[in-house]
Image: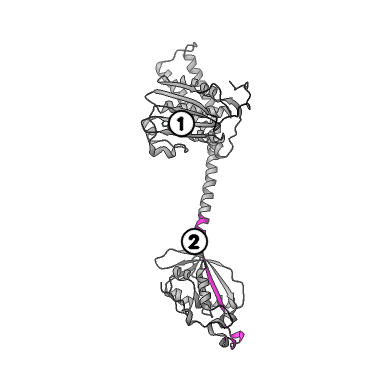
Amino acid sequence: VQSNIPHQTDLPVSTQGAPSLALLQSIIDELPGIIYLVRGWDARIVLANNAARGTLGAHWQPDQSLLDVLAAAQVQISSEEGRPLPLASPAIMQSIQQRKKITPRLVHVQRPGGASRVLLAHALALDPAPLAQLQTGEKAAERIAPEEREPWALIVLEDRSLHQEAEQLKQVVQALKEAEVIKDDFIATAAHELRGPLTALVGYAEMLKEQQTGKGGAELAEWQMEALQIIAHDTMFIANLTSELLDVTRIQAGQLELHRYQANLVALVQRVAKRLRNATQSHELSVEAAAPRMYVSIDVQRIEQVVANLLSNAIKYSPEGGKIRVTIRSDQERGVAELAVQDQGIGIPESQHAGIFNRFFRAENALASGAEGAGLGLYLCKELVRLHHGRIWFESRAGQGSTFYVSLPLLAPGTFRESGPLGT
Ligand code: ADP
């Protein structure tokens, strides 16, 4: 870009210590935004700053009209509605001279081959007397009658492209948030409505199954028995999924409340393990605790949900069976109880580790294994553990099993009641 800054020695030097044009030039060069100092009805350029030359790329000669310079550089200036706009028309210069307030306006500026930019244009009237003195020398300026003095103005263009993009992004984010709330409301309502009939279905399916297993109901054909098993299994699956969805929407809305009690974590884990041991014949499920009692302040039902989820995942993702080891230890120094659930199953490929606790995430090998699931369990575990101020993490490699860990704050010794309803 060719520089047209007049060399300092070409400028008249003020005799009374007033700033010279070169000083003004160096000041406006440092300012952000595009700045033109213009004078006269045809807005002739006296000074333009670095940003002006860099952004609009126009070469100019001192005293050349700003409109001509922009026209020569084929710079298109238009209103927000796309109407062509002269940046410094005689009408604007007249308003400037009459000291009318000129409202800053947004303009779109485009250079040939360049992207359109949004600029906020200000036109500011300046007192012509001292400026005329600066340019023509003190004595000459004094001889010009005030009414004959030409208007002087600063045209300042602020880049608002980023600001406008940020505004648009903000609106998109807001719209997405609103859509998310509507979607969550919809899921919550649907899940809520489904829960009642599903509970009835699960109950009746179980009742029919029990009637068949030795309680004197009418004899069913083998295919009818199989159909009954499928109905019972699938309704249970949908019922679980529905309650997971309900929990997810509650968490998203910040409406999941914990009902905390002081409870022995070891007893809780043993209870859940016993339940799940009954659900599998091909896995050997062991629980080892470093002490018989470790007290934590928890929502018992919610932590049972976390442990059940980790154990049923260990079973589900070990299709060949094998050992599932649950260990519980306490770290008095850090004040936490730590639970580990270790399996010998399909493991989790390293490339999938980052997404494991995300909603609806399922690793590729889990999908390929055909194991059913919606990818909500670990998301819920993470959120429930977080609400308890605990931590959840895992170690795993494809084909080499997984270990999931949960740590929960221990109650300080002496603060718990040994004989609570859940304290054993
Ligand atoms: P789901 O089991 O319904 O898919 P989860 O949220 O419980 O959902 O788990 C998310 C994903 O994490 C699973 O789909 C699976 O890819 C992986 N995963 C969880 N637990 C294990 C495990 N013990 N072994 C291997 N992969 C696991």
Q: Is residue 239 visible?
A: no
Q: Is residue 68 visible?
A: yes
Q: Is residue 163 magenta?
A: yes
Mark 2 sits near ligand 1, with its Cβ under 8 Å away: no
Comes first in the chain, label 2 or label 1: 2
Circle 2: residue type = Ser
Q: Give the left or right position of residue 74, taking residue 181 as reference.
A: left
| Vertical relation: 266 (above or below) 366 | above
Q: Residue 153, located in which quarter of the rendered image?
A: bottom right
Task: Give the total number of marks visible in the rendering.
Answer: 2
Report the quarter where the C terminus lies: top right
Mark 2 or mark 1, whichever is nearer to me: 1
Identify residue for label 2.
161
Identify residue for label 1.
404
Q: Residue 260, located in which quarter of the rendered image?
A: top right
Task: Name the foreground residue: 105 vs 282.
Answer: 282
Label 2 secondary element = helix
Q: Residue 370, located in which quarter of the rendered image?
A: top left
**Dot 1 alpha-carbon crowd within 10 angstroms: few under 14, some 14 to 19, many 20 or more:** some
Q: Identify the residue shown where x is 47% and y is 14%.
A: 212
Q: Where is residue 42 in the image (x, y as percent from the top left)?
A: 51, 79
What residue span does the magenta drawing correspond to? 141-168
Mark 1 sits near ligand 1, with its Cβ under 8 Å away: yes
Report the quarter where the N terminus lies: bottom left
* Cα separation between marks 2 and 1: 48 Å
Q: Does the magenta stretch include residue 3?
A: no
Q: Give the left or right position of residue 169, taking residue 143 as reference.
A: left
